[in-house]
């Protein structure tokens, strides 16, 4: 009888390639992390919920990416597959990084855990760091190289857009609990800066993933440079205004850390959150400056 060759069920290259192996490690590390936490490590409060969401979300989305590439559905889904995987990998890197910092601080250091519970939480933190490292490796492997033609989100400006939106989300968390922007019109302007720049950066990401950049009434690269310049100017004002109205006595601010913050060792007090917002605002200003430089270079290169 003639020998019949069995055709492979799917694209095994999606699992055996270097990127595929890294994605399998991401899923494995994330699964081990939340399994350790659920088994005995425990989680509680909003910080614990955020960490658990990060690990579970990243695990589920990584499996989805692997499934799509294994089955070969990249060209049948309404998203740009040149932009979506690396965008998710960058967000996953930042999410797991935040979870790797928040979880040990809130569940090991401040909780004073001991015995097996502490061991499980330390192990979960280690695997969370490994998950973050694996996603950062994927970003490094799949980002655009000089002269390579690929999706915008794989370029440095595209990855910076992800950082800009993620930092803005952290600012929103700190600024909303407690509400710290309603004491003066200048602080409301800072909130407007965070919201406007966040929305514009998110719109750029959605347009790239949905391959809808042609909907813009002007050239995409010129739109990027114009909006990034506007964001730099707006964030520059917020970087100056926010500390003035929160830490200057003449403007009703508090320059020194209150005494009640020293006794509140379990979490950030209100004053600490104001400082964190000021630092994050300065960080996002630097990110937007780097984004502006890279976007301007793209225009000059194309010209």
Image (cartoon, helix red, strand yellow):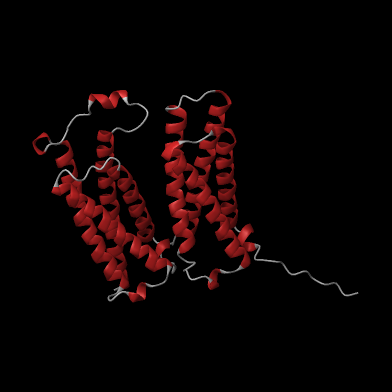
Horizontally, residue 206 falls left or right of residue 248, namely right
* Residue occupying image coordinates x 44% and y 59%: 87
Query: Which quadrant is home to the C terminus?
Result: bottom left
> Residue most toward the right?
1
Residue 132 visible to an observer of this rendering:
no
Q: Is residue 32 above or below residue 231?
A: above
Give above or below for 218 relative to 162: below
Task: List x then y, in percent, for residue 221.
Answer: 30, 69
Q: Single out the residue that lies furthest toward the left.
A: 250
Q: Position of residue 218 (x, y in %)?
A: 27, 75
Going 14% across and 45% down the picture, which residue do you hit? 184
Quadrant of the snapshot with the N terminus: bottom right
Left or right relative to 206: residue 190? left
Q: Which one is nearer the viewer's eye here, 40 or 32?
A: 40
- In the image, residue 256 sits, relative to residue 167, either above or below, namely above
Q: How many marks?
A: 0
Residue in the foreground of this view, choosing between 118 and 70:
118
Q: Determine the residue positioned at 54% across, 40% down.
A: 127
The spot of residue 9 in percent (x, y) is: 70, 66
- Quadrant in the rendering for residue 40: top right
- The residue at 46%/51% (across/down) is 92
Query: Residue 17's x, y, as percent?
Result: 61, 59
Q: Is residue 186 left or right of residue 210?
A: left
Whether residue 217 is visible to the viewer of this picture, yes or no, is yes
């Amino acid at each position: 009888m003639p020998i019949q060759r069995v055709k492979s069920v799917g694209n095994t290259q999606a699992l055996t390639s270097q990127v595929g192996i890294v994605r399998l490690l991401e899923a494995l590390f994330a699964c081990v992390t939340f399994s350790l936490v659920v088994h005995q490590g425990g989680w509680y409060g909003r910080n614990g919920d955020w960490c658990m969401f990060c690990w579970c979300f990243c695990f589920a989305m990584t499996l989805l990416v692997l499934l799509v590439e294994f089955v070969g559905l990249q060209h049948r889904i309404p998203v740009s597959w040149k932009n979506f995987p690396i965008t998710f990998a960058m967000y996953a890197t930042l999410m797991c990084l935040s979870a790797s910092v928040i979880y040990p601080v809130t569940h090991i250091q401040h909780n004073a855990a001991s015995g097996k519970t502490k061991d499980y939480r330390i192990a979960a933190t280690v695997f969370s760091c490994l998950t973050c490292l694996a996603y950062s490796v994927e970003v490094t492997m799949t980002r655009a190289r000089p002269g390579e033609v690929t999706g915008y989100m794989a370029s440095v400006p595209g990855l910076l857009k992800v950082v800009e939106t993620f930092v803005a989300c952290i600012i929103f968390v700190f600024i909303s609990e407690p509400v710290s922007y309603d004491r003066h019109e200048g602080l409301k302007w800072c909130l407007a800066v965070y919201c406007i720049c966040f929305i514009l950066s998110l719109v750029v990401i959605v347009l790239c993933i949905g391959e809808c950049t042609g909907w813009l009434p002007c050239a995409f690269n010129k739109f990027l440079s114009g909006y990034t310049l506007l964001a730099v100017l707006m964030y520059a004002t917020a970087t100056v205004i926010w500390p003035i109205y929160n830490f200057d006595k003449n403007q009703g601010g508090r320059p020194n850390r209150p005494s009640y913050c020293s006794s509140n060792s379990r979490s950030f007090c209100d004053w600490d959150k104001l400082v964190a917002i000021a630092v994050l605002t300065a960080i996002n200003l630097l990110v937007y400056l780097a984004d502006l430089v890279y976007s301007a270079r793209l225009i000059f290169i194309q010209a």
